[in-house]
């Protein structure tokens, strides 16, 4: 089925949670017309695509290792993308299009997660597929952004903020891994 636009945050003190929007599928790549933004051309080369160049080699390696292990252990896929700028585009539209084009997550489970950071625009977003939205709620993702990621970003520690966000999401999914399937829907 689809995914709702779930959460967004402006870097700084303001955390904005977007209301649900139209359904879309995160788990299947979408053919698009001519490229109109970086979201249409940025290649998926790894669990971590650091187009903005804000991560050290070691931070990138740790994130890739962690996200690879997460996918092997759970089947869920999470990716991290940094971009210089959204070039005037809304973070929600950009992240959704990027997640759809990359095909983050399994098509049959719609369980992809994309963390996007655009430091020049002071914007970040956690995009979650429908298959995980009951476990990674708007409130939870807003807490991850405000409590783990934004304080690090505000200090220029982008790698640390992304690592802390990834860790919090993985911990949340691990904490309710034993829930019956009927409750997960």
Image (cartoon, rainbow, N blue to C red):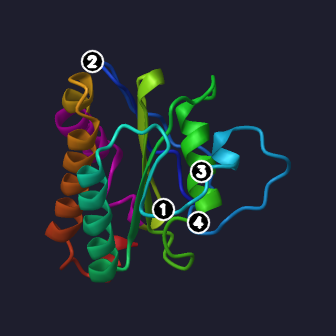
Label 3 or label 2, whichever comes before in sequence order: 2
The local secondary structure at tag 1 comes to helix
**Helix or strand or loop: what does disc 3 sit on?**
helix
Q: Residue at x 40, y 58 (%)?
A: 133
Sequence-first tag of 3 and 4: 3
* Res. 144 visible in picture: no
Residue 65: say if magenta: no
Residue with the mark numbered 1? 130
- Sort mark 3 into few (<14), some (14-19) or many (20+) by Cα contacts within 10 Å: many
Corner quadrant of residue 136: bottom left
In three-dimensional space, the C-alpha distance between marks 4 and 2, rounded to whole angstroms, equals 31 Å
Residues at marks 2 and 1 touching, judged by CB atoms closer than 8 Å: no
Which mark is in front, 2 or 1?
Answer: 2
Tag of residue 103: 4
Magenta span dominant secondary structure: helix
Vertical position of residue 18 compared to residue 68: above or below: above
How far is disc 1 from disc 4 in space, using C-alphas?
13 Å
The magenta-colored residue range is 132-149
User: 50 or 134: which is nearer to us?
Assistant: 50
Residue visible at 85% across and 47% down? 34
Tag 2 secondary structure: loop
Is there a contact, CB below 8 Å, between mark 3 and mark 4? no
Is 20 left, or right, of 77 in this rendering? right
* Residue at mark 3: 98
Q: Which mark is residue 13?
A: 2
Mark 1 / mark 4, whichever is N-terminal: 4
Q: Is residue 11 visible?
A: yes
Mark 2 Cα-neighbour bin, 10 Å: few <14, some 14–19, many ≥20 = few
């Amino acid at each position: 089925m689809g995914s709702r636009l779930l959460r967004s945050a402006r870097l700084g003190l303001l955390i904005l949670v977007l209301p649900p929007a139209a359904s879309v599928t995160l788990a299947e790549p979408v053919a698009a017309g001519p490229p109109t933004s970086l979201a249409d051309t940025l290649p998926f080369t790894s669990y971590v695509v650091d187009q903005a160049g804000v991560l050290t080699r070691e931070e990138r390696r740790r994130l890739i290792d962690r996200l690879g292990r997460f996918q092997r252990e759970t089947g869920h896929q999470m990716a991290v993308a940094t971009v210089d700028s959204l070039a005037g585009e809304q973070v929600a539209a950009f992240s959704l299009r990027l997640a759809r084009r990359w095909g983050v997550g399994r098509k049959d489970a719609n369980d992809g997660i994309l963390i996007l950071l655009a430091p020049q625009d002071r914007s970040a977003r956690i995009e979650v597929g429908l298959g995980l939205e009951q476990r990674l709620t708007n409130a939870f993702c807003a807490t991850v952004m405000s409590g783990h990621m934004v304080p690090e970003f505000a200090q220029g520690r982008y790698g640390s903020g992304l690592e802390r966000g990834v860790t919090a999401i993985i911990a949340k999914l691990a904490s309710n891994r034993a829930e019956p399937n009927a409750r997960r829907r």
